[in-house]
Image (cartoon, rainbow, N blue to C red):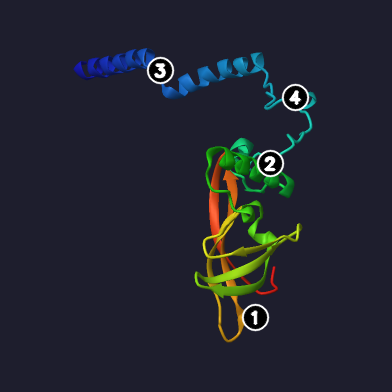
């Protein structure tokens, strides 16, 4: 009798726990119908990615390479550093200037300016040399007037002067006259003189 009671109690407790804790397989089976219902309520819709075909426009070039660096040149700065050669006045203008200096010298009672000062170094030609008690001298002919001058060391032209006279007593035709010639350049409004040595022999220009 006692054995039967224990078996009965054991069976009752098993049925009790089985009712409170359903098996996992039972849960899985109960969930499947719900899943199928949800799948039937929400159909699988494919979403489109990217822009619409009618919104795509063909590529148009901007006119230059976007990877090439654009270099801007400052034209004002480059133009400001241009160097130019400054010319000299014409012979007529230089003659007028000489006459003004001559009149001023007469008014002041001063010595007259050297007529050679009307001419450029490039306008005189050596035609011969001479020698006296004061030393060596040279004959210069000015172009285009054809005027001949007797000058010595230190005589001044419009843009230079006679530095020295080199003579050979045994050969007067080999005499040479060394001039200093001055020219002018301008940069950024500033004038700069440049001197060079010019050597002329008899008959050379």
Label at residue 22:
3
Q: CA distance from mark 2 to mark 1?
A: 72 Å
Earlier in the chain: of badge 3 and badge 2, it is 3
- Label 1, secondary structure: give it: helix
List the residue tagged with mark 4: 52
Residue at 76%, 57% in the rendered image: 145
Which mark, residue 173? 1
Q: Which residue is painted at 75% across and 36% down in the image?
A: 61
Distance between the alpha carbons at the discs numbered 3 and 2: 74 Å
**Mark nearer the N terminus (4 vs 1):** 4
Cα–Cα gap, marks 3 and 4: 53 Å
Residue at mark 2: 65
Query: In this rendering, would 88 be left or right of 52?
Result: left
Residue 52 x, y percent position in the rendering: 75, 24
- The relative height of residue 58 versus residue 110 in the rendered view (above or below) is above
Image coords of residue 162 (percent x, y): 55, 63
């Amino acid at each position: 009798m006692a054995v039967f009671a224990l078996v009965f109690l054991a069976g009752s407790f098993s049925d009790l726990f089985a009712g409170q804790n359903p098996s996992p397989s039972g849960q899985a089976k109960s969930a499947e119908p719900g899943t199928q219902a949800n799948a039937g309520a929400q159909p699988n819709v494919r979403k489109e990615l990217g822009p619409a075909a009618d919104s795509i426009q063909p590529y148009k070039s901007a006119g230059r390479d976007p990877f090439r660096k654009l270099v801007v040149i400052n034209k004002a700065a480059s133009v400001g550093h241009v160097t130019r050669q400054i010319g000299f006045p014409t012979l007529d203008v230089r003659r007028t200037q000489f006459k003004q200096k001559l009149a001023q010298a007469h008014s002041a009672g001063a010595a007259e300016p050297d007529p050679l000062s009307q001419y450029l170094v490039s306008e005189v030609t050596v035609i011969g040399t001479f020698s006296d008690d004061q030393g060596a001298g040279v004959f210069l002919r000015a172009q285009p007037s054809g005027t001949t001058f007797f000058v010595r060391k230190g005589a001044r032209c419009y843009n230079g002067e006679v530095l020295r006279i080199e003579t050979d007593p045994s050969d007067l035709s080999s005499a040479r006259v060394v001039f200093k010639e001055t020219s002018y350049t301008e940069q950024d409004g500033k004038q700069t003189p440049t001197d060079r040595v010019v050597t002329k022999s008899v008959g050379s220009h």
